[in-house]
Amino acid sequence: MAVAEIIVDVPTMQTNRPFEYLIPDSLSDVVVPGMRVEVPFGRGKRKIQGFVMQVKATSDFQGKLKPISRVIDLKPVLSDEMLQLSYWLADRTYSFQISCLQTMLPSVMRAKYKQYVIPLDNEDTEVQTLLDGKETLEITNQLDDATIRLINKLRQNNKIDIQYVVENQALQIKRQAVTTNLNVIQLHEAKSKLRANAKSQIKLLDFLAHHLEELPVELNVLQKEFGISRSAIKTAEKNQLLQITEVTKLRKPVGIDPEKTTKLKLTEEQRVAVSEISDAIQSETPQTFLVEGVTGSGKTEVYLQTIEKALQQDKTALMLVPEISLTPQMVNRVVGRFGNQVAVLHSGLSSGERYDEWTRIENHDVKVVVGARSAVFAPLNKIGLIIIDEEHEASYKQDDNPRYNARDVALWRAQMNHCPVVLGSATPSLESRARAEKGVYRLIRMKKRINNQNLPHVQIVDMRDAENSATKGDFSPALKEGLQTTLQRHEQAIVLLNRRGYSSFMMCRECGFVLKCPNCDVSLTYHKDLGKMKCHYCGHEEPVPRVCPNCKSKKIGFYGTGTQNIEQQLNTLFPEARVLRMDVDTTRRKGSHAKILQKFGQHQADILLGTQMIAKGLDFPDVTLVGVINADTTLSLADFRASERTFQLLTQVSGRAGRADKTGHVVIQTFNPDHYAIKDAAKQDYETFFKQEMYIRHQANYTPYYFTTLISVANKDEGQTLKQSYWLKKQLETSLSKDAILLGPSPTMISRKQNKYYYQIIVKYKHEPQLHQKLLEILNETQADAKKGFTIAIDNEPQHID
Ligand code: ADP
Ligand code: ZN
Ligand code: ZN
C-alpha cells in the first residue's frame, strides 16, 4: 500500500511535521497531494483533519502505520507550489505549518460546508448512474469508496465538477422585483384610462411597456435609476397593473461595470519603466523592481501595460494593493482594462463571494487577480508578473499568526514562477529603498507628474505662533482662509485628522516638545495603569511631567480631538458647506466606504473630513485643497518608524490635491515645523528624506541596518510573565554574539488585555546564524508551558511595536 505524508490539524510543536499514513487500496488513485483527508490520531478513536503533502510508495517507519479514514476533498485544494510555500512560511514566521496551510485557503473552506457533485456532461451514462435521476449529489462520509473512486474518475475526465457550499449561508440573495402579466397593448390601454395628472403612474406604465423584455426589474433599480417611487409601485400593484415578486440576485463583487479603457500613450518615464519590466517578463527573470514615482506620475498605467504584457505571453498577473485603497476607483481601472479576466479579492466580499472568486481563479477562468494582503495566496498558475502597489504599507504584514509579510511571500512566488516583482510607491519603505541602493532591487524613478503638472504648493503652519495658539479650536487662520477660498470657487477640500498614536503621548503646545526615551530615540508612552511614562523598547520609565522639560511651560499634556468634534467646528465655521465624514464610525457598514467616496466624487459634498483612510489612492479632479489638522501625532508614535510614517502620510495626502489641471494647495498644521519628515514631505522630496532617515537609523541601530525580532510573552500572572521573560532573555543572551542588541523585557502599550500581562523583548542583530534555531527551540520548550497559560509569540521584522 502506498503511503501519504500528512500535516495534521493539531497545532503543537510536536506535530509540526508530516505524519505517515497508509492509503487504503480502495483510495489508491484518489489520494493526491494538496487534498484534505481525515485520519485517526492518538490512542483513542479521535479522527482529525490533515493535508496530504506527499504520496510515496513505501515508508521507512518501523512501526505499524494507520490508514487514512476518508478523503474530505475530492480534488486537491492546494497546488504543489502552495504546499512548498507552507514549509518556508512556517519556518520563517515561527508558526505551525497547519496554520499556514489553512491561511492559504478561502475562509469558506475552513468553515462548515457541504460538497456537491455538479454534472457537466448529462449524457454520460456513468454520470447518470451516479446521480440516479437527481440534479446533484451531496458528498457525505456515507459514500462508499467505490462511489468516491467513480466521482474522482468522472471529475478527472471533466464529466462532473465539485462545488463547496457553506452551511447556513444563502448562496443567492433574494430581492423584491416588479413584473407584469399585461402585454404592451393592455399597458397602453391602462395608461389611456389614467387621469392626465397621474404623472408617476404614467411614467411607471411607460417604463413597463418599454422594458417588458427585461422584467422582472428590481424594485431598487426602479427607484434609484428610474426615479419611480415606492408608493407609485404600490398603487399600480393595487390596481393590478403589476405584480411584486422575488428574484435572486447573483453574487457579483464589482458593483458597477466600469467603462472599458484603452492603453494610454506613455510618457517617456512610463515607457522606460514598462520596457524594463516587460523585458524581465519575457526573459522570465525573477528580478525585483522598485518603482519610485511621485504621486500622480502614472504608476497605475505602468502596472496595466505590464500586466497586458504578461497576458500576451499567455501568463497571469497578481496585483496587491492595501485594503484601504482597494476602492472602486482602483478596481475599476483594472477591470476597465481587462474586463472579466479579473478577479477581485477584498474584505468587503462575503465569504461566499470570496469563494466564488477563488474558484474562478482556480479554474483558470481569470488571468488577473487584484486583492489585499491574503490575495498573495491566490491559486494562479504561470504567474508572469506580481505587482505590489504602495509597497511601504504596514498592512501587508499580518498581525496574527502566521505573521507573514505579503511582500516576502510575493518574492518567494516570483522565484518559483520565474517572474519579476514590481514594488511601487511614492514613498518606498526604507528597507526596499536601501535594497535598491545596494543593487538587490532595480530602481526605476518617475520624477514627473503626468502632463508636467506642478506638485501642489505646501504651506507649513507653525501652531506655536501666537496668532495660531490664540485661536480657539483646531483651525489656524491659514487653513480657514484656504477652505473659504476653495468653497467660494466651488472646488473641493480634503481635511485629514491624524489619529494614529492618539493621546498616548505628551506634547508641549508651547514649544512642540515630545518626551523621548534617553536610550532608544522613540517617544515615551503613557501607561494609565502605572501612571507613568514608559519606553516600549527598553522598559525605561519616568514620572509624568507637570511642566515642559524644555521650555518650562505648563501647556504640556495629552493632545487629541475626535473627528466628530472637527466636523462640528467645520459646520460652525462654514455653515453652508456640505461635509462628509469618513472614519471607523461612518464606515462600519459594508459598502459605506465606497458610498462616501462616490458621493464626494460626484461633488455632492464640498469637504471630505477623515482619518488616515482618506490619505491614499484617491484621484478627484475637483480637490484643490488638502488640510492636515495635526501632523504631530504620527511623528510622536512610540515607534522607530514614526518619522517614516509621518513622511509617508503627509506625502500621500498632499498628493490628493491638484491632480487635474487646477493647481493644488496643501496646509499642514504642526508644532514641529522644523522636523525633516514634515519639511521633506512638503517638498515631496523622498530622496532627501531617505538620506536623512538612513543616517538616523544608522546612529540608533535600526532597520535597515539591523534586523529586528520581537518576542512577546503573555500570562495571567504578572510575576510569572516577568519571570518567563527574564528566562527567555537569558536563553537568548547565551546564544547570541556580542554584536546583537537585546532590549527589554518591557510591558507592551496595553500591558494588560483579556486578563493577561504582556511583556516583550526586542532583538536587534546583523548576523546571528544561531538565532533562528534558538528561537525554534525556545518555542518548542514553551509549548510544554502552554498548559500553564503561557503564550509566546515571535514576530520577524515587526511593522509596529506597541
Ligand atoms: P500615481 O498612481 O502614480 O499617483 P496615477 O496612475 O493615478 O498616478 O495617474 C495620475 C493620473 O494621470 C490619472 O488620472 C491617470 O489616468 C493619468 N495618466 C496616467 N498615465 C497617463 C498617460 N500616459 N497619458 C495621460 N494620462 C495619464
Ligand atoms: Zn515646551
Ligand atoms: Zn528605551
Image (cartoon, rainbow, N blue to C red):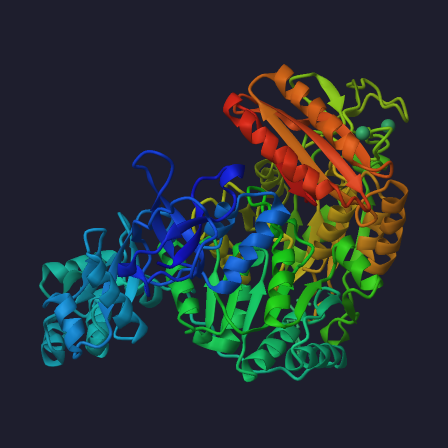
At 78% from the left and 31% from the top, the residue drawn is 734
Q: Quadrant of residue 281?
A: bottom right
- On the rendered structure, is 358 left or right of 669? left
In the picture shown, does residue 443 fall above or below 20?
below
Q: Quadrant of the N terminus?
A: bottom left
Report the number of numbered marks: 0
Residue 801: tell me if it is visible: no
Q: Quadrant of the C terminus?
A: top right
At 80% from the left and 63% from the top, the residue drawn is 436
Front residue of 337/55: it is 55
In the picture shown, does residue 30 fall above or below 752?
below
- On the rendered structure, is 634 left or right of 264? right
Direction front: furthest residue: 62
At 87% from the left and 36% from the top, the residue drawn is 738
Front residue of 334/474: it is 334
Q: Quadrant of ligand 3?
A: top right
At 56% from the left and 58% from the top, the residue drawn is 85
Instruction: List x then y, in percent, for residue 464.
Output: 84, 36
- On the rendered structure, is 83 left or right of 671? left
